[in-house]
Image: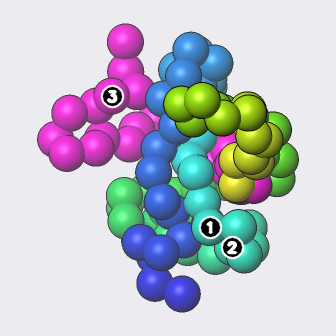
């Protein structure tokens, strides 16, 4: 897998923003990606040293939606994988020249 196929997007939430103080960054990654692949992809893309990778398989939620004059139908969001990457002390990740993770 190519590095850009492994790391899909950063997750920017309140919780992930507070974790950046502890050198932890959260990404949405490919469901089939392993911790080793995630480590190498982040190191290649952002030119940083990764010390630890934690992953979580997030289950998709059930959602109901309705169309005009029709009964509500149920659907399911896709399952996805989240990775929390810990960097070596003193390193930061910048995206597009702007450090979105720094407050």
User: Which image quarter: residue 79?
Assistant: bottom right
- Residue at image mark 3: 100
Colour scheme:
rainbow
Q: Is residue 65 left or right of residue 100?
A: right
Mark 2, other Cα within 10 Å: few <14 / some 14–19 / many ≥20: some
Circle 3: element type? loop
User: In x, y percent, where is residue 85?
Assistant: 63, 48
- Image marks 3 and 1: residues in contact by CB distance under 8 Å: no
Instruction: Please state, as top left, top right, bottom left or bottom right, where the N terminus lies in the image.
Output: bottom right
Between the residue at mark 2 and the residue at mark 3, the CA separation in whole angstroms equals 24 Å
Look at the picture and state if 7 lies above or below 89: below
- Residue at image mark 1: 30
User: In x, y percent, where is residue 98?
Assistant: 20, 33
User: Which image quarter: residue 70?
Assistant: top right
Q: Could one spot residue 24 in this view of the protein?
A: no
Mark 3, other Cα within 10 Å: few <14 / some 14–19 / many ≥20: few
Q: What's the residue at 40%, 27% (across, down)?
A: 101
Between the residue at mark 1 and the residue at mark 2, the CA separation in whole angstroms equals 5 Å
User: In x, y percent, where is residue 76?
Assistant: 76, 48
- Residue at image mark 2: 33
Instruction: Please state, as top left, top right, bottom left or bottom right, where the C terminus lies in the image.
Output: top left
Q: How many marks?
A: 3
Residue range corresponding to the magenta coloring:
79-103
């Amino acid at each position: 897998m190519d590095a850009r196929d492994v790391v899909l997007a950063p997750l920017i939430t309140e919780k992930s923003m507070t974790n950046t103080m502890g050198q932890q960054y959260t990404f949405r990654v490919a469901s089939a990606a392993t911790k080793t692949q995630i480590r190498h992809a982040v190191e290649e893309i952002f030119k940083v040293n990764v010390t630890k990778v934690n992953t979580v398989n997030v289950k998709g939620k059930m959602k109901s939606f309705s169309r005009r004059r029709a009964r509500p139908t149920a659907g399911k969001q896709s399952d996805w994988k989240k990775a929390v990457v810990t960097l070596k002390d003193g390193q930061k990740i910048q995206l597009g020249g702007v450090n979105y993770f720094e407050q």
